[in-house]
Every structure is written in structure tokens, then in C-alpha cells.
Amino acid sequence: MAKVFRRVCAAFCQVFPMAYAFYCDPDKPWLLTHLASKYVFRNRRGRPSRKLPQADPPQAPSLPSLYEDTEEEDNNEAPPVVAPEPEQPNSINTSSGTKSSTALEAAALEAADKDNTPTPEITYMSTSSSSCSSTNEQQKTVEEDSLEKLRSIVSVGDPMKKYVEWEKIASGGFGTVYAATDTATGGEVAIKQVCLQKQLKKEQIVDELIVMRDNKHPNIVNYLDSYLVRDKLWIVMEYLDGGSLSAVVKEISMSEGMMAAVSRECLQALAFLHCHQVIHRDLKGDNILLGMDGSVKLADFGLAARITPEQSKRSSVVGTAHWMAPEYLTKEEYGPKVDIWALGITVIEMLEGEPPYFWELPHRAMQLIISKGIPELQNREKLSPALQDFLNRCLQADEDSRWSAEELLQHPFLLSAMPLSGLTTVINAANQLREASRQRKGFGMPSSSSIDGWNSEQN
């Protein structure tokens, strides 16, 4: 009886303010609405949560009612219907990345409003976990396939027994290059040791080996052998003792006749590669090696691409920015003529010691080439009409208007080529100037990587 009395009193305390407010101010119904909403809010606050209980949490006491049997009804009332929690969405890969959690929440709210059901809670998890897992598995598969291909290409044996008198000549982020002597022939070789753990795309190193192995030419650095030694790949190549073209032109100006000779040798290599469906994609002075016997050879096929008659274009943006053709950015695809543009920039490198916009950041340099074109050459009036026309044919912004390697081999500029034996004098003069400059600056030992031009930084 006392329990019923307490409930009646509590209910009276709740209802009386509303009745009295309406009696005193019948023209202010909003006051009654306000008090009623407070009553409803208290009633809702005492009800169970809209979340589905994970255990059996203690039930909040229901509000007193005017009738005794209300307590039983409140205690037995089921929780409000909750829409089922949505399944974890998969990542949505777009150009800007994964769809944001805000977008997922907005979709859930909109669906809840349409169904007139309470808004489900959204649990945010890492939406990229399944995508990352799949990508990692694919990458692991590609790496395993690449290592399997490498094992089928490389030789078996101990290279330390075959090659002696090792001398470090260059080093970079992905490996080190040594000069060594082949015990079987007594000849000098270059051995590039590539750390496979630092090679993000191991399939590229496989492509480099295959391109070098399958494309033998007098103007391409000759691949001799390769070995897998623990976590390193050893690539054995012929050694060129004259260093890189860039190391020479930084110290000395070449005559037009010598530039014509070097350009002709490079074009012969490019014509051969393009005929065999290969794009070098990183032609520059650093990757043109010279010999004291006058040889000129293309090196570094780490970014080379193989094409087919069915797929004669590529789309990935690779290379060195200051030598890259405009179509890398202006078109979705490009073909072998990106190498011709790079050759034209290399001729400017021979003229001026560096490519256009060399002191600009790479992306800025590419933008300037597209928007403003190649800047006016220094002492252009001193250049022969044949050289100016040769550059014009190489540096056509329109890929279709640019001459091919076969066409450029017939250009009149190449008729002025000097004998390649003259390279020996040029290389020696550049080495002497470099050594004199180093001594003036107080350096003792020469930097073999800058002299010999065996660049392993980007491999």
C-alpha cells in the first residue's frame, strides 16, 4: 500500500505542474508542451540503451506511473528495435584514396531516415586492411616469381674465384660497382652488386638483365655474366675506362665534329633497341660510357621497357626529369621517340655542360619545358646550321613530328663526325682539368665514381 501511495504522489508531482500551468495561462500552450517534453525526456532517459546489450547490464528503473501494473509492463518491455549493424565496407580505391568515414556515416544516416528506424552505430575499422593484405600478397608473389626468374638466368659458382684484383669505382643507394680482373681471360670487367632488399621492384632488375643479355650491339655495354650471392645480385659487364660522357663535358667543350661522332654512336644503339622493341627511357650523359679506345656505349638499362607490336606505347612516368620528353606529362602514352628527345637534350649537355633548366627542381623543369620550350642556347650564332637543324629535329614537342633514330642517322650533321680515336685526347684533357681543380680545392684522392661514371644510384 505504501508503494502505491509513493507512486501516486510521484505521478501527481509530475502532472500537477502541467495542469496548473495550463490553468493559469491557457493562452500559452507552448508552456504545457515544454513541461510535457521534460517529462518525456526523463522517461526516455530511464529506458534501456538503444545498443544491443553485450552482457546483462543492470536495467535503469522505470519512471513511476499512476497505476500499479505499469511497473511490470516497464520491466518486461523489449528494447527499441535496432537496425542491424552494417557489414564492414571494403576499401573504395579512387584517385584520392579510400572513401572517408564521414561519407560512410552520411550514407548510414540517410538509410536510417528512409527506413524510419533508429540510426545504427558505425564501428570504424581500418578500411584498407583487406586491400593492403591483397596488395602485399600480390607483391610477394611478384617478388617470388622475379627471384625464380633470376635463379634461371644467373650462373652457378663462386665469382670470388673467377674475378680478382677488386677495386671499388662507384657506389650508390642500391649497390656498388667494382672493377675486377677475369682470371680466365685476363681482361678487366665491371661488376655491379645490387642489394635486392633495397630494390622495391625486383621485376625491374630482371628486365634489365634480360634486355642486356638479349641485345648485343657494339654501342651497348656488353653483359657478360651474373650471380646471386646471398641477398645481392652481381652483374658482370665489360669495363669502359674512359668514364661517362657527363664527366667529360663538365670539364671541357667538345667540338661539333666530336659531338657528331658521339651522337652517331648513340643513334646506332637507339636504332637497334627500337628495332628490337626496347625503349631505354633514361638516356643522358651519365649513362653514355666512353672508352680510351674511342668506344661509345649506352649503359644502365634499369628503366628500360620492352614493347610489342600490339602494345607499342608505355604510360609509366620514369626517367630523369631534365631529359624527359613533353609527352610524359601531356599524353597518356608515349613511344620510343622519348629516347630521341633525350638525345637532343644530351647534345645540349655536350654543348653547355648541363641540360636546360638544370638548376630548377625536376617537376618545375618539366613544366618549363612544356610551357616555354627549350631556352635559347648560349652562343647559338656560333653553331652550324646543320647542328641547329639536328637539334630541331630531335626536340620537336610533337612526338609525331620528331624524327626517328633511323631518320636521324641520315642527317647531314653526322657527316661532320670526327674519328672516334680523337675521344682519347678529349678524355685525357678532361681528367687533367678535373684533377687540377680538385687539387686547388684541397682534395687529395680522386673520386672514382665521378671520373669513371659508373652510376649505381638509380638501379
Image (cartoon, rainbow, N blue to C red):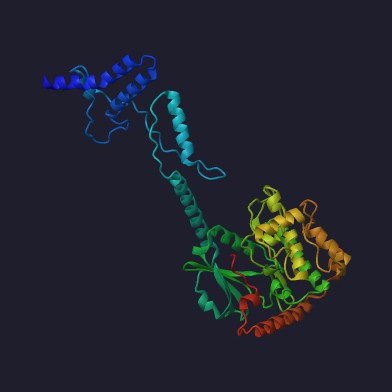
Q: Is residue 25 left or right of residue 374?
A: left
Q: Nearer the viewer, residue 364 or 194?
A: 364
Residue 379: percent from left, percent from top = 83, 69
Taking depth in this image into account, of 30 and 345 the one nearest to the observer is: 30
Is 12 displayed left or right of 375 in the figure? left
Quarter of the image where one finds residue 389: bottom right
Asked if 323 appears above or below 96 in the picture, the reply is: below
Does the rendering let one see residue 171?
A: yes
Left or right of 396? Residue 226 is left
Say which quarter of the image contains residue 183: bottom right
Q: Position of residue 266 (x, y in %)?
A: 74, 66
Q: Residue at x 50, y 43 (%)?
A: 98
Q: Quadrant of the C terminus?
A: bottom right
Tell me the residue at 64%/75% (across/down). Answer: 450
Identify the image quadrant of residue 322.
bottom right
- Residue 323 % position (x, y): 70, 61
Q: Is residue 204 above or below residue 67?
A: below
Residue 353 % position (x, y):
74, 71
Vertically, is 322 above or below 328?
below
Residue at left 24%, top 25%? 63
Q: How many marks?
A: 0
Q: Nearer the viewer, residue 294 or 45?
A: 45
Instruction: Residue at 68%, 53% (x, y): give it.
Output: 328
Q: Quadrant of the N terminus?
A: top left
Residue 73 visible to the viewer = no
Task: Find the residue positioned furthest to the left.
Answer: 1
Q: Is residue 253 above or below residue 74?
A: below
